[in-house]
Amino acid sequence: MSKSFIPEGYRPVLNLYDTQRAIGMIKRLFEDTLSSVLNISRVSAPLFLEASTGLNDDLNGVERPVAFEIRETGTEAQVVHSLAKWKRQALKDYDFFVGKGLYTDMNAIRRDEELDNLHSIYVDQWDWEKVISKEDRTIDYLKSVVEGIVRAICATELTIRAMYPALNTHPLLCSEVTYITTQELEDLYPDLTPKQRENAFLKEHKTVFLMQIGGKLKSGKPHDGRAPDYDDWDLNGDILFWSDTLQQCFEVSSMGIRVSPESLDRQLTIAGCDNRRELPFHKALLNGELPYTIGGGIGQSRLCMLLLGSAHIGEVQSSVWDKATRDMYREAGIPLL
């Protein structure tokens, strides 16, 4: 059963026609701005990968990929969850150099996703990855990239509001980023759940980079799950905004400096995933054969929702919803695509 709801008094600011036009404009504007800010170039990317490569993103380790057998090869393919690991291999294969990176449209199916206002089984995001030096594997470098992404988001917002003045009924996003670790957040709100902590902090600070996701906290539990084989859990985080429409925390991007051979070795053991050491990607990484990188995913529908003040992701993307959600929004006169 979906956990979707309709905020009291909510009505879409734009009609369906203008919403579709605005979505296209947001995607073009942001993509161009992001590529300039991060010095990244567009590349083609796969919709599915052979399961044996170990390149598919395992997310929290429990989600089931959509899989099928390829008749001609007799091998199993999986629809991607994300391209977190594929991108790093591609940077090596395409001979990218330090300071240069790639981005792509990533389309995924996450069949086990719990549906609500922000979550769909269809995922569309800009997956990006950039080669860095070993010396760049620092918190300061991570923060500089975060601030570049937030600048690109805020610049896109100003342009789209100039084109659609009706959007000015919503407060502008805060361009000043507040940084906090998951442990600091738990220390502030020890009696709240992780999501409640995020909401409490974002209500005050509006734009936040929540750092160090994946490892266990003092409570003995991680703030959130994070696969052990792409982000370094000490050098990662989520870009969060406060949604005035939903009156809650709104994640736009999960990102981080990627694992080194040393941190991969450590995190595979902590996560109980030592069996992955023999997969081609993991062997190459442990042997130091892949470049040091930073990367992440930025939700396309999420960004459109945020900038258009939408209440449900189904207003900006076409997916499948349960009957109760469809009926609730239809009766309220709010179209889901």
Image (tube, rainbow, N blue to C red):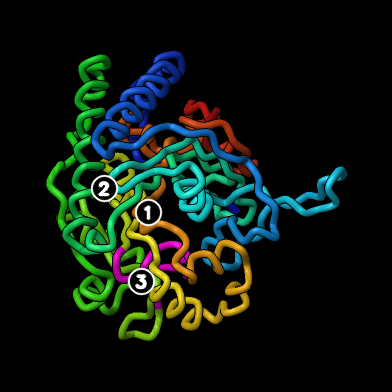
Horizontal arrangement in the rendering, residue 97 relative to residue 3 (left or right): left
Could you tell me which secondary element the residue under label 2 belongs to?
A: strand
Label 1: how many Cα within 10 Å (few below 14, some 14–19, many 20+): many
Eye-nearest disc, 1 or 2: 1
Amino acid type, residue under disc 2 in the picture: Phe
Classify residue 281 by image quadrant: bottom right
Residue 174 circle label? none
Examine the residues drawn in magenta and state their main secondary structure: loop
Query: Which of pointers 1 and 2 lies earlier in the amino acid sequence?
Result: 2
> Magenta part of the protein: which range?
222-235
Q: Residue at x 30, y 39 (%)?
A: 245
Is residue 225 found inside the magenta-colored segment of the image?
yes
Could you tell me which secondary element the residue under label 3 belongs to?
A: loop
Amino acid type, residue under disc 1 in the picture: Ser
Horizontal arrangement in the rendering, residue 214 relative to residue 44 (left or right): left
The residue carrying mark 1 is: 254
The residue carrying mark 2 is: 241
Amino acid type, residue under disc 3 in the picture: Thr
Return the x and y of residue 59 as percentages of the image width and height. Answer: 52, 61
Q: Residue at x 22, y 64 (%)?
A: 138
Query: Which of pointers 3 and 2 lies earlier in the amino acid sequence?
Result: 3
